[in-house]
Image (spheres, grey):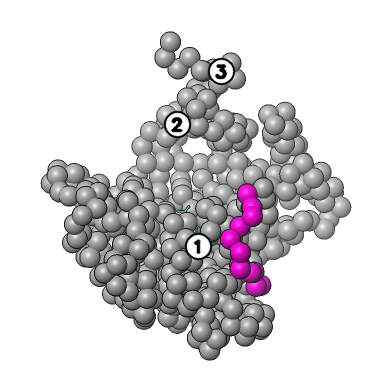
Amino acid sequence: MAFAKKSEASRAHDNGHLYHDYVNPQWVKLLDVLEMNVTYTRCEGASLLTSDGRTVWDFLSGYCVHNIGHNHPRVIAALKGELNACGPAMLQSHVSDLAGEMAARLCALAGGRLAKVFFCSSGSEGVEAVIKFARAHTRRAGLLYAAGGFHGLTCGAMSLMSAPFWTQGFGPFIPGTEAVPFDSAEELEKKLATKKYAAFITEPVQSESGVIVPSPGYLRDAQALCRRYGTLFVLDEVQTGMYRSGPFLAAHHYGVEPDMVVMAKALSGGLIPSGAVLMSEAVCDSIYSSLRRAIIHTSTYSENSLAMRAGLATLDVLQDEGLGERARIMGVALRQQLAQRLAGYEMVAEVRGLGMLSGVAFRAPKTLRLRVLFEAFSRIHPAMFGQVLVRRLYKKGLLTQICGNNFMVLKVAPPLMVEDGVVEKFITDLVEVVDLMHAKASYWTEALGIARRALSAI
Ligand SMILES: Cc1ncc(COP(=O)(O)O)c(C=O)c1O
């Protein structure tokens, strides 16, 4: 019988029973517990239509994938055009004009030292390339990274991450990596002065760490120190790039010129995997240094024509629709409104961010009545508070998430084209939920119900 493996447990699931049985049952269970296991039938712009006729507004963007909105017609047309043309795909024996065009566009937009591109298919793969390139270029083994950051879940990328939630049980990781506190040039210099390090790798704004925006001079100081001690200065712009923070790269906001930049996620418009490492001429020359080394670092899918076509169309959309400027202006307005309307709620610590990457940071309440409740279910799981908030917002038709390395921060990252009215709805609904969590016992009793369901599902 087809699909004979279908289990009793999975029969209860209309949504994703094959996924449950053959891919990852825990993911299905988690979405079930949160009552977020929904079938989406059509996704356009910032809206996600569900099979039961509801509209959910996307304020997560697949963790900053959907900068131009879901299923942009120009990206779809570019992909269809490429498929219809029956051009060369995965030949591994030709020079890709499309990759050349895409690289030229990226370098022109990035500027500074960034003059060459290595293409790959994900952010993690880009980080892996950075590790190799930095070591080969400097002939040093050490790698410094900013504590709390997120760089991906392959072994090399995880070697640059300090959060045990992700790394526990998967070690040992690559040797020679060390963390320094984010936003401390002083601590960075202490390490760099040993001249052991090939690269210092950081996100310009730490996304999963809680949308941590550094002090204005930090990245410039970090860059100067890296140059002084012969260490490559590398920015992971997997989330912040492609105009998410306002300019094309967050590096531009801080006036720095990194030696390498990793990009992915929004790079190809959200329909096909793509990643890129932008690097200086000098780094590229030292990797691809001779005919013998012409293919010393490659990847099968890296320059595939669908990703390149989608990437070119995505850049066109971002520029033609002025989405960077929109992100800059809207982001400031959003944070101002949120800060104003959430002021005075004791559990709201801060609203922060850059461009259309914002975080609402929560904290434990001081009022005894709330504190008892808060602690009761924080003890169940540290992410429980955030997940209840996410679920509440979801019930109001808003898809959000808490940060992967900081469960007390709600991330706010809609597509950059999101309509003003939808942003207003988000603000109104979030304020309502925050008000409820401060005022009504029912918020907490419902939350405890979810926590119990979660526990019984484990
Ligand atoms: C800042 C950052 N770097 C790297 C990665 C890894 O990207 P990928 O999931 O495409 O491997 C992520 C993924 O979320 C990320 O947020």
Residue 31 position, x and y percent, is: 57, 35
Q: Which residue is mark 2?
A: 39
Question: Which residue is at a point 36% across and 62% down the rendered structure image?
Answer: 297
Q: In the rendered view, does 388 fall on the left or right side of 18?
A: right
The residue that appears at 43% across and 69% down in the rendered structure is: 133
Q: For this rendering, which residue is in front, 153 or 91? A: 91
Q: Which residue is mark 1?
A: 357
Specify the segment rendered in magenta.
170-181
* x and y, in percent, of residue 189 in the image: 63, 84
Q: Label 2 sits on what residue type? A: Thr
Residue type at mark 1 is: Leu
Separation (CA) of disc 3 from disc 2? 20 Å
Q: Is residue 438 magenta?
A: no
Pointer 1 local density, CA inside 10 Å: few below 14, some 14–19, many at least 20: many
Say which of 366 and 168 sits in front. 168
Lower sequence index among marks 3 and 2: 3
